[in-house]
């Protein structure tokens, strides 16, 4: 019994964005930032259409840049057309509190994160990927590994199987009739959120050269602490210079947010693909070689 308890604690420590994250055990007050007043960032007025309700509608590329062409029904197109909340609205934590931290985000994704402390950094990225595959009816491709290495497959979940966690032993068992409702899909994702994290997602993705960046690629540092952000749009100029936008969730669980560029406000929320030794985002810094892609 003691061994099982210790194993459970280790699992939770490995799944979060930071080492303080424990999605079910640590009280909220131990890992919540102190509320501070948010400063809405308006980098360059002509780059933003406050009336736009998707990434593509709300943000214009800087002068001389054009959005890269995307294939119809691609993951990139799905991300570029993500729905956003009304401009100026604040990110909400899972318990309804507002994220008032200054200089982090410019817009909020219109996403239901539930009322549990689950939807953190890697979880937001996995949900975006799974939502895309679900929308394309590519159910067999919806699968994520737990930190333990267990492969959680949505196709099995659809057949009525559920996942049993018994210490270090993880297995399927038949629990209900086959179903493929969106509600059931989100319950599957909650199970993934609870037992997966940056450590497991990092191992699932394949490394790519930053010069080959595509929309949907992920900057990720797996572990505890660890963090991940996803590329949600890109543009390019005639000289071949690329710029991109990033989104993240964080801890405690919160709505996905479009990040500002803290180092170049003149093009924020766009980031340049060159010119800096590291990728500096408002809440994390990545080496350029930490870029990975869903297989």
Image (cartoon, helix red, strand yellow):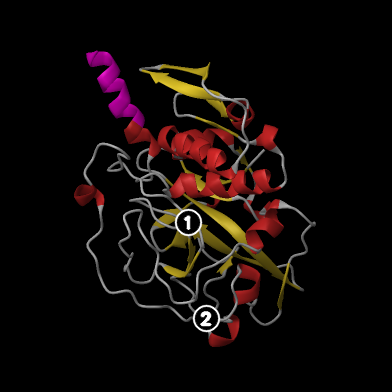
Main secondary structure along the magenta-highlighted residues = helix
Mark linked to residue 43? none
Which residues fall within the magenta stretch? 1-11
Q: Position of residue 85 (x, y in %)?
A: 50, 69
Q: Position of residue 46 (x, y in %)?
A: 59, 86
Residue tagged 2: 266
Q: Position of residue 246 (x, y in %)?
A: 54, 61
> Which class describes the residues within 10 Å of circle 2: few (<14), some (14-19), or many (20+)?
some
CA gap, disc 1 and disc 2: 21 Å
> Which class describes the residues within 10 Å of circle 1: few (<14), some (14-19), or many (20+)?
many
Is 144 part of what is drawn in magenta? no
Q: Is residue 150 visible?
A: no
Residue 167 position (above or below residue 88): above
Q: Residue furthest bottom?
A: 45
Q: Is residue 78 visible?
A: yes
Residue tagged 1: 248
Q: Is residue 1 left or right of residue 277?
A: left
- Tell me the quadrant of the picture where the C terminus can be found: top right
- Of pointers 1 and 2, the one earlier in the residue sequence: 1
Towards the viewer: 208 or 77? 77
Residue in the picture at 50% in, 46% down: 220
Towards the viewer: 222 or 186? 186
Element under label 1? strand
Q: Position of residue 182 (x, y in %)?
A: 58, 44
Given this view, does label 1 or label 2 mark the residue nearer the observer? Answer: 1
Residue 209 position (above or below residue 192): below
Q: Quadrant of residue 179?
A: top right
Towards the viewer: 22 or 162? 162
């Amino acid at each position: 019994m003691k061994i099982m308890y210790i194993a459970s604690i280790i699992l939770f420590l490995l799944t979060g964005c930071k080492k303080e994250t424990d999605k079910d055990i640590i009280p909220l007050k131990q890992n919540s930032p102190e509320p501070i007043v948010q400063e809405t960032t308006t980098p360059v007025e002509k780059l933003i259409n406050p009336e736009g309700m998707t990434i593509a509608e709300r943000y214009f590329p800087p002068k001389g840049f054009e959005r890269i062409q995307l294939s119809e029904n691609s993951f990139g197109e799905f991300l570029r057309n993500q729905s956003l909340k009304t401009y100026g609205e604040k990110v909400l934590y899972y318990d309804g509190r507002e994220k008032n931290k200054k200089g982090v985000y410019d817009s909020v994704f219109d996403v239901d994160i539930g009322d549990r402390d689950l939807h953190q950094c890697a979880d937001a990225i996995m949900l975006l990927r799974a939502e895309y595959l679900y929308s394309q009816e590519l159910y067999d491709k919806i699968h994520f590994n737990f930190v333990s290495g267990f492969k959680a497959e949505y196709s099995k979940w659809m057949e009525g199987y559920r996942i049993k966690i018994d210490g270090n032993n993880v297995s399927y068992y038949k629990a209900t009739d086959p179903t493929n409702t969106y509600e059931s899909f989100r319950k599957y994702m909650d199970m993934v959120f609870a037992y997966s994290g940056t450590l497991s997602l990092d191992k699932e993705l394949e490394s790519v050269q930053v010069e080959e960046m595509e929309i949907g690629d992920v900057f990720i540092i797996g572990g505890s602490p660890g963090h991940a952000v996803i590329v949600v749009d890109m543009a390019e100029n005639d000289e071949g210079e690329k710029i991109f936008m990033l989104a993240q969730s964080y801890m405690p669980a919160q709505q996905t947010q479009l990040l500002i560029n803290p180092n170049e406000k003149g093009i924020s929320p766009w980031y340049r693909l060159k010119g800096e030794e590291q990728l500096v985002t408002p809440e994390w810094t990545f080496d350029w070689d930490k870029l990975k892609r869903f297989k």
